[in-house]
Amino acid sequence: MASFAETVAASRRTFMLRLLVTLGSSANESVIASATTQGGFGQATRDDIRKDLDLLKARGCTTEEWFDNVVRVVTITERGEDAAHGRIDVAGVERSTWRR
């Protein structure tokens, strides 16, 4: 059974994937962090956001591109879109019931 913190993190990652779908597939880390905080995950630190983005990349849900080694732009993959819509299960990501 997952801990409360793990459950919240999995939900937060699902929110991030949905956000990327809504934004048209890409956003920089700062936009994702701000939207995630405003989206009900205000307790998340910037380190939490970075770890979540790293996990999503490792699971094949996103890719990233760095500009000037400072700005990270994250893009959702087809796998990430499938997870955002609840069509597949991804370890560490809450099963989505979102339909869009």
Image: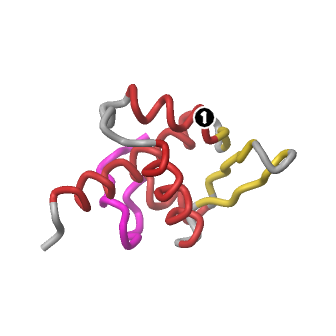
Q: Residue at x 59, y 32 (%)?
A: 31
Left/right of residue 20 with respect to residue 66 in the rendered view: left
Q: Residue 92: horizontal and vertical position, in percent?
A: 36, 67
Q: Amino acid at mark 1?
A: Ser
Q: Which residues are magenta?
A: 85-100
Residue sitting nearer the eye, 32 or 48: 48
Q: Residue 42 is drawn in which quadrant?
A: top left
Figure check: 22 above or below 13 = above
Query: Residue 24 vs residue 59: left or right?
Result: right
- The residue to which callout 1 is attached is 30
Give the image's coloring scheme: secondary structure
For the stretch drawn in magenta, the main secondary structure is loop
Residue 73 within the segment the image draws in magenta: no
Density class for disc 1 (Cα within 10 Å; few <14, some 14-19, many ≥20) is some
Residue under the image location 43 percent in, 35 percent down: 36
Q: Is residue 38 left or right of residue 73?
A: left
Residue found 37% across the figure and 58% down from its top: 86
Say above or below: 54 vs 8.
below
Say which residue appears at 41% left-offset and 70% top-offset. Answer: 90
